[in-house]
Image: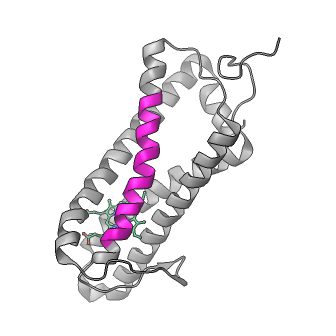
C-alpha cells in the first residue's frame, strides 16, 4: 500500500518551483518591508531617491502578489509534503499561522495597490520600472488616509507572523534535522 504523503515524513519534500517561490517571496517581503519603512522618511528634496524607492517597493509588492497566487495554484495542484512529526495542537497552530500568512501575502500588496492608486500625490506605479499599472481609484484622500495605516499595520503583522514561522522552522530543524532541509533542497 502507498504511504499517504501527508502522513509520511520520509516521503518527498517540496517541489523545486514551490521552494524557489517560497524563498523568493520571503526575500521580497523582507526587502519590501524595510524599503517601505525607509522610503516614507526620505525627505521631498531627495525626490529622485524617494521616487525610485517607491517604485522598487511597489514592484516588489506586486511580485509578491503574483508569486503567492502561483504558489497557491501549485499547492492546490501538487499538495504539500507531510508535516514533521509534532503534536496535533502544534500542527493545527502551524496550519493556522500559514493560512494567515497566505491571506496577508494577498491582502497587504492588494491594499498597497489601492493606497498607491488613491494617493493625493499623483505618482504613477511602474511595475519593474517600466510597465505602467492602471490607476483605478483616482486621488481620494479619505480612502488613502483610511487605508495607509491598515497597509502598514498588516505589513507589520505579516512580518511578525513570518518571523514566528521562521523561528518554529529552525526549532523543528534542530529537533528533527529535516524541516528546513526539505524546503531548501527538496
Ligand atoms: C508584501 C508586500 C508589501 C509590504 C510588506 C509592504 C509594506 C509597507 C510598509 C512597511 C510601508 C511603510 C508604512 C509606514 O511606515 O507608514 C509601506 C508603505 C507603502 N506601500 Fe507597501 N507593502 C507591500 C506592498 C505594496 C504594494 C504592492 C504597493 C503598491 C502597488 C504598496 C504601496 C505602498 C505605498 C504607496 C506606501 C506609502 C504609504 C504612505 O505614503 O503612507 N505596497 N508598505
User: In the image, is residue 87 above or below residue 23?
Assistant: above
**Viewer can see residue 182:** yes
Q: Residue at x 22, y 78 (%)?
A: 140
What residue is at 41 percent from the left and 61 percent from the top? 109
- Could you tell me residue 70's position as x and y percent? 61, 53
Where 123 falls versus 92 (above or below)? below
Image quarter of residue 130: bottom right
Q: Residue 182: where, in percent of width, then height?
A: 67, 32
Across and down, in percent, residue 174 comes to 55, 22
Please identify the residue farthest to the right as the structure is shown: 1
The answer to whether 108 appears left or right of 5 in the picture is left
Q: In the rendered view of the protein, which quadrant contains the C terminus?
A: top right
- Image check: 163 left or right of 13? left
Magenta stretch: helix, strand or loop mostly: helix
Instruction: Please say if 103 is above or below 8.
Output: below
- Whether residue 34 is visible here, answered yes or no, is no
Q: Is residue 156 left or right of residue 168?
A: left
Instruction: Please say whether residue 45 is one of the residues in the magenta stretch.
Output: no
- At x 43%, y 80%, the residue is 125
Amino acid at each position: 500500500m502507498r504511504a499517504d504523503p501527508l502522513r509520511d515524513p520520509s516521503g518527498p519534500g517540496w517541489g523545486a518551483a514551490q521552494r524557489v517561490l517560497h524563498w523568493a517571496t520571503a526575500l521580497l517581503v523582507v526587502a519590501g518591508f524595510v524599503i517601505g519603512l525607509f522610503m516614507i522618511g526620505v525627505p521631498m528634496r531627495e525626490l529622485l531617491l524617494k521616487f525610485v524607492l517607491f517604485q522598487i517597493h511597489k514592484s516588489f509588492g506586486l511580485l509578491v502578489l503574483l508569486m503567492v497566487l502561483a504558489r497557491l495554484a501549485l499547492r492546490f495542484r501538487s499538495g504539500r509534503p507531510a508535516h514533521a512529526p509534532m503534536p496535533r495542537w502544534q500542527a493545527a497552530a502551524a496550519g493556522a499561522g500559514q493560512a494567515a500568512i497566505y491571506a496577508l501575502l494577498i491582502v497587504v500588496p492588494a491594499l498597497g495597490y489601492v493606497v498607491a492608486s488613491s494617493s493625493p500625490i499623483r505618482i504613477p506605479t511602474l511595475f519593474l520600472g517600466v510597465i505602467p499599472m492602471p490607476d483605478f481609484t483616482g486621488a481620494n484622500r479619505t480612502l488613502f488616509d483610511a487605508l495607509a495605516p491598515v497597509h502598514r499595520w498588516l505589513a507589520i503583522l505579516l512580518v511578525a507572523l513570518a518571523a514566528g514561522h521562521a523561528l518554529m522552522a529552525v526549532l523543528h530543524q534542530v529537533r528533527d534535522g529535516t524541516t528546513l532541509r526539505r524546503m531548501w533542497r527538496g
